[in-house]
Image (cartoon, grey):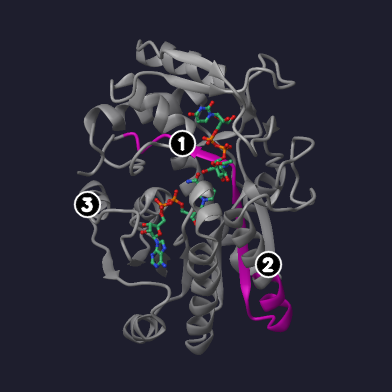
Amino acid sequence: MNILVTGGAGFIGSHTILELLNEGHNVVVLDNLYNSKLTALERVEELTGRSVTFRELDLLDVHGMDKLFSEHSIDSVIHFAGLKAVGESVEKPLFYYENNVTGTINLCNVMNDHNVKRMVFSSSATVYGNPAESPLTEDSELSATNPYGQTKLTIEHIFRDLCRSDSDWKVSLLRYFNPVGAHESGRIGEDPTGIPNNLMPYVTQVAVGKRARLSVFGSDYPTHDGTGVRDYIHVTDLAKGHLKALEHLEQESGAEAYNLGTGNGSSVLDVIKTFEKVTGKKIPYELTDRRPGDAAICFADASKAKKRLGWETEKTLEDMCRDAWKWQTKNPDGYN
Ligand code: NAD
Ligand code: UD1
């Protein structure tokens, strides 16, 4: 298949492209490189021995996207492109709505014009808001607690309406839990700019000596050790979920949501202990106040993806820590 991958130079996109190329698909990438480097794609080419077509292009550039669709015969789109920093979305809501929501509407309009109506979309567990209970099923209540989350929720609604209006459209809404880790080669991985907001990149930066210690946000949650519980998923397992969703698209009738998680919850202290065990590195940490907006517990019921897509995770928390550490040590300054 010829697949257009938006945001393909980013963390999850680059790992997914690697799996697509290994399965024999042809890949065209659209990315404005706002939060990524072309090096990621060069390394994917190196790892697979195959090439990708890259266009530095913005979702807000309708004319550019129209030209891209005219030049390439696209069968399906995997849509990763978007902004994802929760804090920044609170400070710059218009920037987030325009980039994520308007950008997606532009993409869908161009797809409509070129009669391309197959889409796998990067949604997020953030659409469950601050959940009262886990495991979360796809039918759990949806809400948003910040502008970033609202963009994902809005885009999900747009796809549902679009599919209702035109039965030729088939969309998979993939709700990722907490993607971490890196490709086992250590050649591609997550490259956050500045101080990481997320746990795993912060842990690896402490381990490599870039940061003095980790702040554990909250130790009085109603969890087994008082720290927050999440469903960490290896980015390679997540990438493979996209291939399964793509293969299953023809059988969908409209827009269908899938949780992509392991179904297991791990606490912050579980992550620290596992990381220390597999790497032999000590992670100095201090227990601090809760981070505003954080849920106590959030993990998936991933049985729908298993049953319908034939997908389930294979990698363990140990694999996630080992591979994140391999990427960090081989690339102390990311792709720079
Ligand atoms: P990322 O920032 O590494 O990748 C996103 C890519 O999109 C980047 O390469 C960026 O340059 C590009 N991009 C952003 N806006 C664009 C625009 N207007 N035009 C063209 N390119 C644009 O992020 P990621 O972690 O790979 O996430 C991919 C998708 O998955 C995002 O939509 C994100 O919201 C979603 N998601 C991520 C996580 C996570 O923890 N990483 C969790 C849930 C959902
Ligand atoms: C965050 C985002 C969420 C996004 C997800 C994946 C917030 C409020 N939520 O979720 O919208 O979909 O990332 O990108 O930003 N922790 C620490 N110390 C740290 C960092 C994190 O103790 O320095 C804890 C958190 O309190 C949480 C866990 O580690 O319990 C995981 O945090 P993080 O990696 O930021 O992911 P989420 O909070 O689940």
The answer to which image quadrant residue 277 occupies is top left
Secondary structure under badge 1?
Answer: strand
- The x and y percentages for residue 107 are 49, 76
What residue is shown at x 38% (from left), y 10% (from top)? 282
In the rendered view, would you say 213 is above or below 119? above
Circles 2, 3 touching at the beta carbon (< 8 Å): no
Q: Nearer the viewer, mark 2 or mark 3?
A: 3
Q: Is residue 174 magenta?
A: yes
The part of the chain drawn in magenta is 159-184
The residue pinned by badge 1 equals 180
Q: Nearer the viewer, mark 1 or mark 2?
A: 1
Percent position (x, y) of residue 263? 66, 34
Q: Earlier in the sequence, mark 2 or mark 3?
A: 3
The kind of secondary structure element at disc 2 is strand
Q: Is residue 149 above or below residue 71?
A: above
The amino acid sitting under disc 3 is Thr
Q: Which residue is mark 3?
A: 39
Give the labeled residue for mark 2: 255
Q: Quadrant of ligand 2?
A: top right
